[in-house]
Amino acid sequence: MKLSDTLLQQEGLSMAHDGTTYCGTRGEYTFLILMGRNELVVSVLRGGEEPEKDDFRDLVKARPELSGCKTAGTRVIFSLRPGAAAKSYAGKIHTLLPELLSFLHENGYENCCELSHAVGATVGCMTGGVPQLVAPALFTELSRKADQNERIQAETPENIGRGILGALIGGLIGAAAIVLIGQLGYVAAISGMVLGYCTIGGYRRGAGKLSALGIAVSVVVMLAAVYLGNRADIAIAAAKELDLTFGQAFAWMHELVDTDAYRNNLITLYLFSAIGAVPAAFNAHKIAREKGRVYRIGE
């Protein structure tokens, strides 16, 4: 059985849309499990005071499932030791949960909202992609505001001019990354990732939203950035080798470099850039879609 199935079925947890964030309730406490970070999170107060990580030092030492602990406001973040297999990892969580929550109860820690600090029941939710533990009434208010902002965003016209400007600035940054990595002697997918994030991210920030038109504009800018970045990279190398100025080397490119070698290098760079930029483009689109979204984990 997969770890996700174990947590959902045997532990009765709920899973967020990202597939790595889980939420559960045991008695008076609600907690989060962040699989991507190997963390278990609670939000508590003791006597109205925020917790200190030193308060949990003995617990961490006594529990082999834990490797550390840190606090941030009312959040107590326990670092989980990953298991060698899903079954062993799920077993660690199953063993740890009752001991940890019993420790909280016996030491006077009360479940609370991490935003308002209101003591009482909380719900696990995602707010703009960030997992949080908040009071039910506050979650309702956050959801209402998120829906309102989404309607306003949908009605706000896309600023195509500023979006193109943002994409061009991002493309220049990506082209600079291609040149820098090329001067180090590499043709890497990382340059495509940088190009994808900068170009699409630049359009989204400039236009205020990311539409199909924005993606199309960004792709055109990326194609041009790869071409210019590759040409600039070769021109720099040729200028050093032949004692020319950069302008001369850039302008005389096809007279200085073997045409087949130039074309093959450009094709290779386009391929590597696609490998890096396409996932970056989808991720940027996903981030734009999740921004400002509020939902209860498990719904």
Image: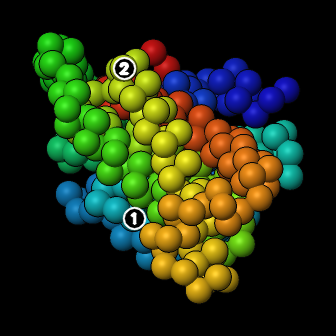
Taking depth in this image into account, of 214 and 27 the one nearest to the observer is 214
Question: Of the numbered discs in the image, which one, if any, rests on residue 213?
Answer: 2
Taking depth in this image into account, of 211 and 74 the one nearest to the observer is 211
Give residue 293's position: percent from left, percent from top: 32, 26
Q: Residue at x 73, y 47 (%)?
A: 263
Question: Of the numbered discs in the image, which one, if any, rests on residue 71?
Answer: 1
Q: Quadrant of the N terminus?
A: top right
Q: Earlier in the sequence, mark 2 or mark 1?
A: 1
- In the picture shown, does residue 239 fall above or below 147? below
In three-dimensional space, the C-alpha distance between marks 2 and 1, rounded to whole angstroms, equals 44 Å
Q: Residue at x 20, y 37 (%)?
A: 162
Q: Quarter-wise, where is residue 82 in the image? A: bottom right
- In the picture shown, does residue 219 fall above or below 232? above
Q: Residue at x 23, y 63 (%)?
A: 49
Q: Mark 2: few, some, or many residues within 10 Å (few <14, many ≥20)?
A: few
CB contact under 8 Å: marks 2 and 1: no
Q: Quarter-wise, where is residue 46 in the image? A: bottom left
**Can the viewer see residue 40?**
no
Lateral position of residue 257 relative to residue 84, left or right: left
Q: Residue at x 27, y 27 (%)?
A: 209
Give residue 15's position: percent from left, percent from top: 56, 26
Taking depth in this image into account, of 21 and 57 the one nearest to the observer is 21
**Can the viewer see residue 175?**
yes
Counting the numbered discs, the total is 2
Which-is-in-front pick, marks 2 and 1? 2
Q: Quarter-wise, where is residue 74 in the image? A: bottom left
Q: Amino acid at mark 1?
A: Thr
Q: Amino acid at mark 2?
A: Leu
- In the picture shown, does residue 27 fall above or below 269? above
Give residue 25's position: percent from left, percent from top: 48, 31
